[in-house]
Amino acid sequence: MPETVDMLNALVLFTNFVLIPGVTYGSQLALGALGVTLIYAVLRFSNFAHGDIMAFGTMITILVTWWLQSVGVSLGPLPTALLALPFGIAATVLLCLFIDRYVYRYYRSQKSRPVTFVMASLGVMFMVNGLVRFIIGADDQRFFDGERFIIKAREFKKMTGLNEGLAIKTTQGLTVVIALVLVVFVFWFLQRTRSGKAMRAYSDNEDLSLLSGIDPDKVVRTTWIMAAALTAIAGVLYGLDKSFKPFTYFQLLLPIFAAAIVGGIGQPVGAIVGGYVIAFSEMIVTYPYKKFWNYLAPDEWQTSSLLQLLSTEYKFAVSFMILVIVLLVRPTGIFKGKVY
Amino acid sequence: MNNALRATLAFSFMALALVGVGLYQSWALSLTILNLCIISSVMALGVNIQWGYAGLFNIGIMGFAALGGAAAMLVSTPPVANAWAAGGWNILFSAVGLIATIIVATLVYKNIPKGRLRSLAMIVVLVTGYLCTRYFFDPAVSAIESTDSAKTGFLGGLGLPIILSWPVGGLFAAGAAWVIGKVVLGLRSDYLAIATLGISEIVVAMLKNEDWLTRGVKNVNGLPRPVPYELQLQQSEWFTGLVEKLYANSLAGLEGAARSTVLKDALIEASSIFVKLCYAGLFATVLLIILTLCVLALNSPWGRMMRAIRDNETAAEAMGKDVTGRHLQVFILGSAICGIAGAMLTTLDGQLTPTSYIPLRFTFLIWVMVIVGGSGNNLGSILGGFLIWFVWTEAEPAGTWLMTFLTNWMPEGNAVKDHLIQGAQHMRLFLMGFILLLVMRFAPRGILPERHAH
């Protein structure tokens, strides 16, 4: 039986490297997937431009952040990007409404098949991607400033006397708090407000909702505004936590879609649960358990191998595997999504 | 304007454009573009089979092309004896372990009735299988990668002629397509899109990280060629004779040293063009074979059935057609063609560079080709392949030139000016998206629309 100290050390290690990053990443994915799912529920297509729209919102936020930094505005311990975020959201909303007006509205009026919308979203993806790369370049950008940590590993060690430290980054705290607020807001909006009820009605049965006098243009507009805001915020939080690179944002498409489908596409609750499922699976499968094991195992079982199920380069494979398993076992996702 | 006339006009225009590049830039460049145009056309044909014939939405073309590229390398490079000696047996054991695990797991799944017992048995089988495989795999990988890692550090291939890899690449891609198709076909149409996107990312990640198999980001250079090398040609007598005849005009009246310098330059130029022509011949043969097969298939009862399924799945199903089965078939065929094209591309490059597989270039550009050319029309896809690849290659210099021209009024060394000129290359992505949206909106049937001769 390992000593209590060792068990505590193992626990802290696991919290620090799997639990906290998992919750953070999961919240980011959940916000992204929520946007995808809202678009899917109301407009009935998978928006493949999502990752690049996320990059667009983040880019505007970064540009405004740089400007704010250059004129000497800051938020003290919090990142300046939070001040710039409203600009990013506004720009993303405008972009989405513009795209909807000049691209998707035509296909809606033609009653095109969903796959035509998806194809059009590919065109949008190309254009937005080109635009982002043109304006800010294809390289990595870091735009975090302010206090880095809420709890530092060294202080934690001193405080508790344990071998392992527990660090919580400011961005991790921010992500979780903002995601929580947003999720509560989205559900309140969908359940309690008139516009939210109109959205749900339109999503459940388009013809019936039109008969009862719901303005379809308004529903579509509200949906785009919400999805765009969620997308921009998700992008900025991800960028603050890790870094901003247009190609990484494009690649986020896979885990985000996996999250939406695993949860049940078109279901807001599903998107959030899906986001955490995907994030935790990625973390659990790609974490090397060597130290964790060595704390718990008796002396004669100590190991020098990494004890890693899958190397980090394959984290995309994890979301893919979960997607495949869910599609095989329960094609509608965890919360019965709309499959037609 | 009827379709035949349109096609003739469009293809003559393409030929003119390529001749124009030859006259004003260089013939070597023109032939390089031509070769890549042909390969792009083959890929576009593969996608057209899936999308145009059956309405399947595959956005993992990059992955299938990458599998073809891996096949080219695995077939053609000579095996590395030391690496096989170091870890060959263990790799074989781990492969056996993996296959055995899959077989046993399938048997368990099929033979034990659904319930707690089956779940438990599955977990036991999978965990044991995983541990056994890793037990042999890990030491094998480190042994192989440490054998002369600067030069080899991988198992190598079979050392066979590289042409053989083209069908092998097709088989690899078909295998991957079968697995994906089995899982997602029959579900909602965009699930296929997401699954193919996923598998293509995984394939490329494997090429980048499994150093023991593909050397990863260290690349495998110097793949053997199916055509002669420039240097061989320059030294061979018959080729020198040929060049002397072709360049008789510029050689006339020259003597001694002056003549040999001119002849040397002529030899270098001619040999590079000759090699590219050989490639073009090989690629064009493949393109013609695949095109013929596609046209025959499209006009056969099978093709009629495919179109019927595409246009109205429910009706086709009511007529007793196995919609999911046909979809699987056509998805495998189209992916195999993409795999062949991927192998051809790696053959042309002469090296396997996993980092060169970028989704925008390999997946989405091909889609633009198919849509612009005219989905459902084979000739249209080929035209789209030529046209879009041509625009894609020429847009970069043109964009830079345009940006330089537009920012001419700005002072030299201005930061904004430099940024604009540097970023101009990214504008071609924007241009491609714009073309795609324009064609979808105003000419949704493409340049060469599908004929309706049911």
Image (cartoon, coloured by chain):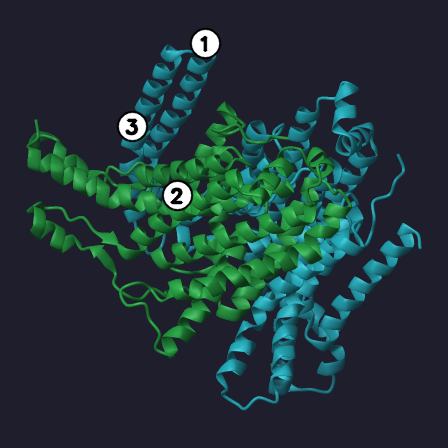
Q: Pointer 2 and pointer 1: residues touching (CB < 8 Å)?
A: no
What is the number of the mark on residue A112? none
Mark 3–mark 1 distance (CA, rounded to whole Å) = 24 Å
Instruction: Tell me what residue is drawn at x 33 percent, y 29 percent.
Output: B133
> What colour has chain B?
cyan
Mark 3–mark 2 distance (CA, rounded to whole Å) = 18 Å
Name which residue type carries label 1.
Asn
What residue sits right under mark 2 in the picture?
A: A314
Q: Pointer 3 and pointer 2: residues touching (CB < 8 Å)?
A: no
Q: Quick one: quadrant of the C terminus of chain A?
A: top right
User: Camera-side residue: B347 or B257?
Assistant: B347
- In the figure, A64 relative to B435: above or below? below
> What colour has chain A?
green
Which chain letter matches label 3? B
On the image, which quarter does residue B399 sit in? bottom right
What residue sits right under mark 1 in the picture?
A: B111
User: Camera-side residue: A265 or A122?
Assistant: A265
